[in-house]
Amino acid sequence: MINFLPRLISGILYILLIFSSIIISKESFLLVFSILTLLVSYEAYLLYLKMKKKGYKTKYILAPHFYVFISMIALIYIPFANSFTYDPYKILFIFLMIWITDTMSYFFGSYYGKNKLNFKASPNKTWEGLIGGIFCSFIFSIVSFYFIKEVYPLWKTILLGLTIPLFGLFGDIQQSEIKRAAEVKDSGNLIPGHGGLFDRLDSTIGNSFIILIITIF
């Protein structure tokens, strides 16, 4: 209970920051997300230094901070894709999908998870959590298209509903491997109860390029 309250408050403030920066204006979005990009890239850089100190040689083409930086740049470009005019609903829809997926994956994994996905870097992930996240993401994509707002064409909306949970898992696993190599539990301590920004944005970072590709085409 002691840790729950700061975790809840910081989580709400984080969501409000993201939501308000997207809705208020193009300028607020660019300002806030540019700051987030610098902060999360810096966290990844510190992890990279710890990895090197531990003698770990990265197996990735890009060092963690470059992977994070270009992924965040791709994310920032999404609401400007195709028309080059700012469309807040595109990026807001993406964050809602990611938040719903993460929340429901955690719910189904916690209450019904029995069959492990067997990822060494993230051993608690289960098939039940993954399938529950995909199901809820898919349902929300349909509901949002017909009853809330048509942001993408139907086929893109459904495709995003199915791919966001998968690439969110990819982002989560990638971040877990980086933290494991750096021998740390959290990427930082910027957000009380949640760790660092990289801990909150791992699924988003894992999704940014595939979402940008779907958005453009």
Image (cartoon, rainbow, N blue to C red):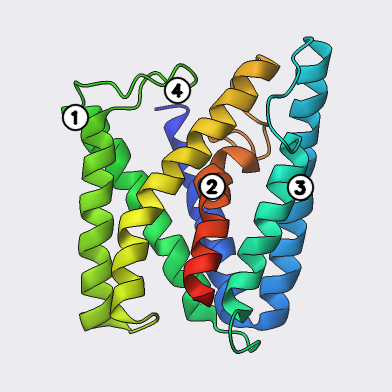
- How far apart are the alpha carbons under marks 2 and 1? 25 Å
Kind of residue indicated by mark 3: Leu
Determine whether, in the image, residue 83 is placed left or right of residue 96: right
Element assignment for label 2:
helix
Residue 148 marker: none
Element assignment for label 3:
helix
- Please report contact status of discs 3 and 1: CB closer than 8 Å, yes or no: no
Is the N terminus in the top left, top right, bottom left or bottom right quadrant?
Answer: top left
Kind of residue indicated by mark 2: Gly
Q: Which residue is mark 1?
A: 111
Kind of residue indicated by mark 1: Tyr
Q: Which residue is mark 2?
A: 206
- Say which residue appears at 72% left-offset and 72% top-offset: 30
**Sooner in the amino-acid sequence: mark 1 or mark 4:** 1
- Say which residue appears at 50% left-offset and 31% top-offset: 173
Q: Which residue is mark 4?
A: 122
| In the depicted structure, whether residue 165 falls above or below residue 44 | below
Q: Which residue is mark 3?
A: 39
- How far apart are the alpha carbons under marks 4 and 3? 24 Å
